[in-house]
Image (cartoon, rainbow, N blue to C red):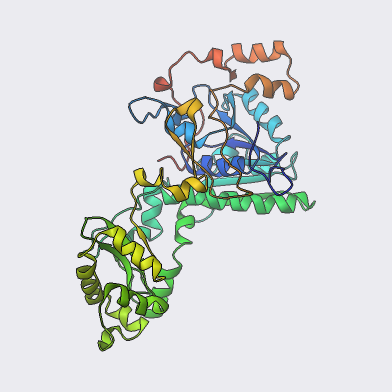
Amino acid sequence: MTTATTAANGSPFLEGVRVLDITGALAGPYCTTILSDLGAEVVKIEPLTGDRMRARRLGPDSKPLPFDLIHRDKGSLAVDMKSAEGREIVRELATRTEVLVENFRAGAMSRLGLGYDDLRVDCPDLVYCSISGFGQLGPMRDAKGIDLIAQAYSGLMSVTGSTDGQLAKAGFPVSDVGAGMWGAIGVLAALLRARAGKGGAYIDVALADSVAAWSLWEVADFVATGVEPAPLGTAHRLAAPYEAFTCSDGNTLVLGAVDRAWAALCRVLDIDLSDDMRFATEYERFVHRAPLAEILQQRFATADREQWMAALRDAGVPCGPVNSIGDIVTDQQFLARNLFVHDEERHGEKTIVNTPIVSDGAPRARGAAPELGRDTAAILTQLGYDEQRVAALVAAGVVGMPSTHAASDAEATTEAPTPATAR
């Protein structure tokens, strides 16, 4: 595998780090995708019929885009982990791996004899990351946890939505991607310890924890006031004006005019509120944010969004457009930072969403997702299996290679444990 993620000396950050990816759905794969984009070599373990996401199709071209985009530039080893020989292959591969990431239900890997305690005897420096709905500890450890449940359980859904009490989930699967990010952070920290000769580590990440850990403002509000925070639409919990406004052309902008920008905002909008004691201080503006929003909305409705944003930015008032997904994939700022990469070889006009870490201006995402079992033969050869042994394993249904997968993606079912974080 090749990488374009480089440090100042031209080397990938995680060059030489091998990651065993035994994941499905989104949280676990996103964790290993981050590591891959940082330069690690990631080998994905798949059941003989393929990861379930291979069968999920989006768009008229009927390609498995969710799988292709989240498993880009990974290797693929197709193996039946329910078989003793299949488990032995995974165990052998783990002895040559620095990191293992899995996101099945608590205890599933241990029941296969592939848990952290099972492997660390032979792999004392192994960094083993488990991602699940509620983690490996606590009364909820055995409960199924998916993104929607995690958003609700973590308290996020109680404060997301409109001011009339209509709840909403976040538009992005934030618990999945958040857990993947926390997993990657934990893995990177544990790798530093392992490479310092202090042994491996077990990293336990939960979707519910990942979102609840972001509740900084809301917990502070609750602790200070004793009042349960409620949905505020686009408004901020501790500052005003800090929300969205609709302009004359129907487009929406967001505004964050804290104390130092308040006077400039009034000048741009040509309104004089200096004698209105409801808005005399930042705290008073926050307390009276509803009537303040009404006054500001009336002014924003008199001109189009581009006019307002140009004037506000010139005055140093923080503001920005409310973009659609179609807007962001062509936005010049994101394009300049290489956040969205066109993979014409595999997807035509489709786009890869990059890992948002810029290093020396180099792109991070590289090749496409692998064909099922593409690397099976090469990996087994590296483990010392000769051609006859590999052929025997294929014939016995222990491993698979591209030529052995006759079933279509649409007919695929999994032979591995169901990911705990399946959406």
Q: Position of residue 224 (x, y in %)?
A: 41, 79
In the rendered structure, the answer to whether residue 170 lies left or right of residue 25 reads left
- Point out the image quarter for the C terminus: top left
Q: Position of residue 81 (x, y in %)?
A: 58, 27
Residue at x 55% of width, y 53% of height: 182
- The reply to whether residue 322 is visible in this rendering is yes
Q: Is residue 369 above or below residue 333?
A: above
Residue at x 22% of width, y 55% of height: 250
Q: Nearer the viewer, residue 306 or 335?
A: 306
Q: How many marks?
A: 0
Q: Position of residue 272 (x, y in %)?
A: 26, 82
Q: Quadrant of residue 258?
A: bottom left
Q: Nearer the viewer, residue 392 or 186?
A: 186
- The reply to whether residue 141 is visible in this rendering is no
Q: Nearer the viewer, residue 191 or 10?
A: 10
Residue at x 52% of width, y 39% of height: 29
Q: Position of residue 416 (x, y in %)?
A: 51, 30
Q: Quadrant of residue 403?
A: top right
- Point out the image quarter for the N terminus: top right
In the rendered structure, the answer to whether residue 366 lies left or right of residue 172 reads right
> In the displayed image of the protein, which residue is found farthest to the right?
197
In the rendered structure, the answer to whether residue 421 lies left or right of residue 364 reads left
In the rendered structure, the answer to whether residue 115 lies left or right of residue 212 reads right
Residue at x 59% of width, y 21% of height: 374
Q: Is residue 290 above or below residue 340?
A: below
Q: Is residue 130 above or below residue 137?
A: above
